[in-house]
Amino acid sequence: MNTLELLNFGSYKLRLKGVLSHQLDSEIILSKVLKKSREKIITDLNRKITSREIIKFHKFIERRLKKEPIAYLFGEKEFWSKNFVVNKDTLIPRPETELMIDKIIKIYQKKSINILDIGTGSGCIIISLLSELENSSGIGIDISNKAILIAKKNKKKNNIGNRLKFLKKSFKNFYNCKFDLIVSNPPYVDKRLLNKLEDDVRKYEPIIALDGGKDGLDVIQKVIYKAKDLLKINGRLALEIGNKQFRQVSRILKRNNFKIENSIKDFEENIRCIISNLKG
Ligand SMILES: C[S@@+](CC[C@H](N)C(=O)[O-])C[C@H]1O[C@@H](n2cnc3c(N)ncnc32)[C@H](O)[C@@H]1O
């Protein structure tokens, strides 16, 4: 069997199961099995594949057919041009979160600030920020011990050093001196909609990273209350929110003495991130 035949076979099986990214997924899986870049593989379609490689490929395709996300198949996800370790205990970093990072870096370039990341998961947000803001430091907290272990691995991999600490802690009982910036991508899915999520998410990603309680706003609201206590005057809160939550979240922010500075839209023109300022 050659590369083209195997790619087509994988893509066909995935398409039958309704995987929209069937072609791409088949290519990624083969590239991981052969330990070669996707580009290299699709420019050498006549390459013969060994039976060991075919067996390995089939095993990954079988897992993908059950909708296991590609990131969990290989235990990694690219985010902010870095490779992050992920597993079933951490949310898979999403591209829309990079939009928030981009904006924050523009605001704080060359400054020296102290950042708190609430619900750090794999640590992707705070690690990406500190890799760019080289004079800054931070703390990432998460209620999940297993997520914190992964975040620590990612810190080591990205050589952030002692500017960053990860703690297993709920934000509800976290006390510290005050921060210049709090970032959070909290769980924000409406509890009633959890069982309507795509299989890839619903069956594999940690429920504690998704369940935002009533209307998906429970945790967001609590993060905002807590941020009031943990921020310096004029400190900023950068929040990722769910689709269609902007109106309600901005109301909560205003009620809690925050002034909205920026709202950032995702690739489908929905506001997905709010940066606000704690008024004096
Ligand atoms: C949507 S995930 C975000 C993960 C990561 N920051 C990212 O953007 O990929 C939300 C995270 O919040 C954590 N979490 C949920 N409740 C929490 C709490 N009370 N205190 C701290 N972290 C919490 C979850 O364990 C999960 O890792």
Image (tube, helix red, strand yellow):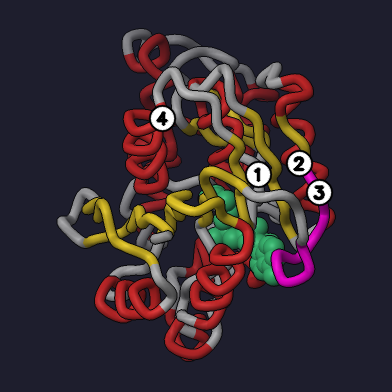
Residues rendered magenta in the picture: 166-174
Q: Is mark 3 within 8 Å of ligand 1?
A: no
Which label lies toward us, 3 or 4? Answer: 4
Residue 137 vertical position relative to residue 134 in the rendered view, above or below:
below
Residue 68 in picture, x, y percent from top left: 57, 55
Q: Does residue 169 belong to the magenta stretch?
A: yes
Closer to the N terminus: mark 2 or mark 1? 1
Q: Quadrant of residue 81?
A: top left
Residue drawn at the location 59% of the way across and 16% of the way down: 35
Q: Which residue is mark 4?
A: 108
Q: For mark 3, what is the residue? A: 167
Q: For numbered disc 4, what is the local secondary structure? A: helix
What is the C-alpha distance between the residues marked 2 and 1?
A: 6 Å
Q: Do the residues under discs 2 and 4 have CB atoms within 8 angstroms?
A: no
Among numbered discs 3 and 1, the one appearing first in the sequence: 1
Residue 262 lies left or right of residue 149; in this view the side is left
Q: Are marks 2 and 1 in contact (CB under 8 Å)?
A: yes
Residue on which disc 1 sits:
122
Of pointers 2 and 4, the one earlier in the residue sequence: 4
Label 2 sits on residue? 150
Q: What residue sits 35% from the left and 48% below the top?
A: 96
How busy is the neighbourhood of tag 4: few (under 14 within 10 Å), some, or many (20 plus)?
some
Whichever of callouts 3 and 4 sits on the residue coming sooner in the sequence is 4
**Amino acid of disc 4:** Tyr
Q: Nearer the viewer, mark 2 or mark 4?
A: 4
Q: How many marks?
A: 4
- In this rendered view, identify the residue nearer to me: 99 or 27: 99
Q: Report how far apart the C-alphas of labels 3 and 1 lie in the structure.
A: 12 Å
Which three-letter amino acid code belongs to the residue tagged 1?
Ser
Q: CA distance from mark 3 to mark 4?
A: 24 Å
Q: In x, y percent, where is residue 78?
A: 50, 31
Q: Relative to residue 216, is residue 136 drawn left or right?
A: right
